[in-house]
Amino acid sequence: MKNFEYFRPETLREASELLVKYGENARILNGGTDVVIQLNEGHSKPEAVVDIKGIKELHELKFDENEGLFVGACVPLNKMGEDDVVYNKFRFLAEAAHSVGSRPIRNRATCAGNICNASPLADTATPLLALDATVLVYGPEGEKEISIHDFFTWVRQTCLKEGEIVTGIKVPAKEVKGLFQKISRRKEVDLSTVCSTIVRDGEEFRLAFGSIAPTPLRLRKTEEFLKGKEITADVVKEAQELAVSEISPIGDARGSREYRIEMVKVLVKRALNELK
């Protein structure tokens, strides 16, 4: 491990200024479940590590009937997944949180960290996409909000600019029915081969998938086709084919391209039949 400067700021302004000062040679430390491994293995060699866990407001987890759910950037996945409000109002989001790694990992890892890694198979990304969540950000220009749909730009890349820090995630208060699904080689402690969240909101459906494109993705054409339709066997079959036309999976150690395509069909059928 290369030597680096360690900072634990107590304000967002201080943290942002440090990130600007060190630029591409700085890394944010939050849960640390990925960063620490990268440091130990020499894959990341920053000059400065900025630990944001000393910033109090990033530890908030709260719900308001008007403002919706707020998950601070430093809230561990276990705390989020076991929160009564999250479980009762957004059960599929809680289940996605519980699908990440092992329990000790979830005691450290965060939802904000999961999406900032911008992996195509990030488990918590699909419920956030299906819920039209907003990412709250602080940076040199102050505070701003970014739609989750604009947040991911490519494999492990986000739209965050130099000095910007994700402070939390906001989910609209509207209650919907949804189903989180994950296919992996092992039932526990494994990365997704394919993951999805499919939500029903009245007569509309929202379909979000991971590990089927360079970024987690909403299937807009399939959603438009399903709008207002009764879920019959023929409708499900056509939705399956439309879903496949919107994805561009690759083959890797976790599954072939063809396998992922078939699993998307399976997940679409299973969710539509459960939510109809």
Image: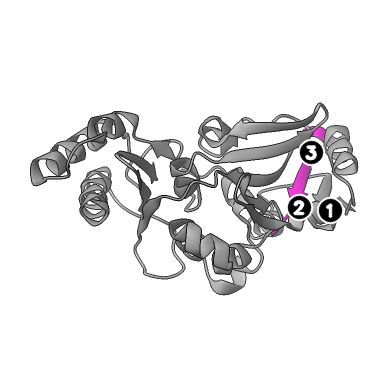
Label 2–label 3 contact, CB within 8 A: no
Mark 1 neighbour class, 10 Å CA radius: few under 14, some 14 to 19, many 20 or more? some
Asked if residue 100 is positioned above or below residue 157 in the image, the reply reads below
Residue 161 included in the magenta stretch of the image: no
Relative height, residue 71 to residue 215 (above, below): below
Circle 2: residue type: Leu
Q: Is residue 218 left or right of residue 228?
A: right
Residue type at numbered disc 3:
Asn
Assign a secondary structure to mark 1.
loop
Quadrant of the rendered structure where residue 139 is? top right
Q: Which mark is residue 58?
A: 2
For disc 3, the neighbor class at 10 Å (few under 14, some 14 to 19, many from 20) is some
Frontmost residue, 227 versus 182? 227
**Horizontal and vertical percent position of residue 183:** 33, 58
Residue 96 visible in this rendered orientation of the protein: no
Q: Nearest the camera: 226 or 5?
A: 226
**Circle nearer the viewer, 3 or 1:** 1
The residue under label 1 is: 55
Q: Residues within 10 Å of mark 2 (few under 14, many from 20)?
A: some
Q: CA distance from mark 2 to mark 3?
A: 23 Å
Magenta stretch: give its range: 23-31
Tag 2 secondary structure = helix
Which mark lies nearer to you, 2 or 3? 2
